[in-house]
Image (spheres, grey):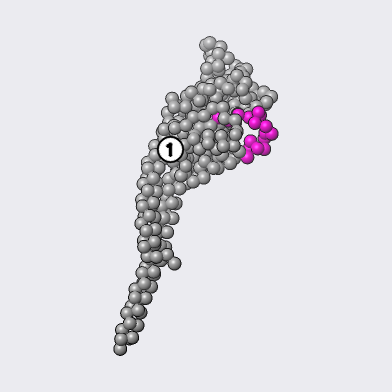
């Protein structure tokens, strides 16, 4: 049985740990509020640009553009969004597990796919397994702006345009609520899921429809990446907040258990001392 000093030391250490996890929970809660606002405020822009792109692409009999056309798949690209830090429960592991299992099922050779990764956790995961990472970005701020990921978004779209890969899938955690995040797989390129609106807006094109799409479609694809990143950041803060709350609750439960053990051990020690004193007194009589 552990000594009173050992139990007391463990209680004190657990109390300090609970203070740290509680502070981290409060920080994550604050970051979540802002990240959730950022993600929600970006939705109207995404809906509007999707409407415009669909109307332009499908207007006047439809336009032909490489980003709108499926082609024979020789190589597949995977854009994976993870975090730079852990302590977020299953936030990173769920995404990485799905991506890894998908790649193992679809491809027999590393030459058949390429990975673009956002976040240090994902980068470390793929490098340890010698998987082909062609682009990466780390150390993004907790509230990223489009300027922070503009370069990697531009390069990602460019890799599809120049034929480095023939299709691109994006994996991230979709924010549902503070206690629920869903791992999401989305086909980003080619843009074959543009649906024509019931009330389609008719545009007059100047310059030509194709020239407008040359500018508009890459911007739209880059916006999809940024929107997914905002969604993933809100999920990250929510997952970390929940993980730290669970850690704090577990620490409090452990403190209660250890305190009960301490009191029992202390009571047993006192009883033992009284017994020894009474026995000694009886021996003197």
Label 1 secondary element? helix
Q: Nearer the viewer, residue 175 or 165?
A: 165
Left or right relative to 153: residue 130: right
Percent position of residue 200, x then y: 55, 23
Q: Nearer the viewer, residue 38 or 249?
A: 249
Q: Nearer the viewer, residue 105 or 283?
A: 283
Q: Residues within 10 Å of mark 1 (few under 14, many from 20)?
A: many
172 falls in the magenta region: no
Q: Quadrant of residue 157?
A: top right
Compared to residue 208, the image places residue 39 above or below, namely below
| Residue at 42% from the left image edge and 64% from the top image edge | 2
Residue at the spot of label 1: 36
Percent position of residue 213, x then y: 55, 17
Q: Which residues are magenta?
A: 101-116
Percent position of residue 272, x then y: 37, 76
Left or right relative to 233: residue 272: left
* Residue at the far bottom in the pictured view: 285
Q: Is residue 2 visible?
A: yes
| Residue at 59% from the left image edge and 23% from the top image edge | 160
* Residue at the far top in the pictured view: 207
Percent position of residue 66, x then y: 62, 19
| Residue at 58% from the left image edge and 14% from the top image edge | 210
| Residue at 42% from the left image edge and 63% from the top image edge | 257
């Amino acid at each position: 049985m552990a000594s009173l000093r050992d139990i007391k030391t463990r209680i004190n250490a657990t109390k300090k740990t609970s203070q740290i996890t509680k502070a981290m929970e409060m920080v994550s809660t604050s970051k979540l509020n802002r990240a959730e606002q950022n993600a929600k405020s970006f939705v109207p822009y995404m809906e509007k640009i999707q409407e415009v792109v669909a109307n332009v692409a499908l207007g006047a009999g439809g336009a032909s553009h490489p980003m709108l056309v499926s082609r024979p798949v020789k190589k597949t690209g995977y854009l994976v969004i993870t975090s730079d830090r852990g302590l977020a429960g299953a936030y990173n592991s769920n995404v990485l597990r799905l991506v890894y299992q998908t790649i193992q099922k679809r491809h027999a050779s590393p030459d058949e796919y390429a990975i673009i990764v956002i976040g240090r956790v994902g980068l470390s995961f793929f490098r340890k397994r010698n998987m082909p990472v062609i682009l990466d970005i780390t150390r993004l701020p907790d509230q990223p702006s489009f300027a922070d990921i503009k370069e990697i978004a531009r390069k990602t779209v460019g890799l599809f345009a120049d034929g480095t890969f023939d299709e691109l899938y994006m994996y991230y955690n979709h924010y549902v609520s503070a206690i629920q995040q869903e791992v999401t797989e989305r086909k980003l390129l080619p843009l074959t899921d543009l649906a024509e609106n019931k009330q389609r807006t008719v545009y007059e094109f100047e310059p030509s429809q194709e020239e407008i799409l040359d500018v508009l479609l890459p911007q739209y694809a880059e916006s999809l990446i940024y929107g997914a990143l905002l969604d993933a950041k809100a999920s990250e803060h929510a997952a970390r907040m929940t993980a730290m709350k669970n850690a704090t609750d577990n620490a409090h439960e452990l403190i209660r258990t250890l305190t009960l053990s301490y009191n029992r051990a202390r009571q047993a020690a006192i009883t033992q001392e009284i017994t020894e004193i009474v026995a000694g007194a009886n021996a003197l009589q």
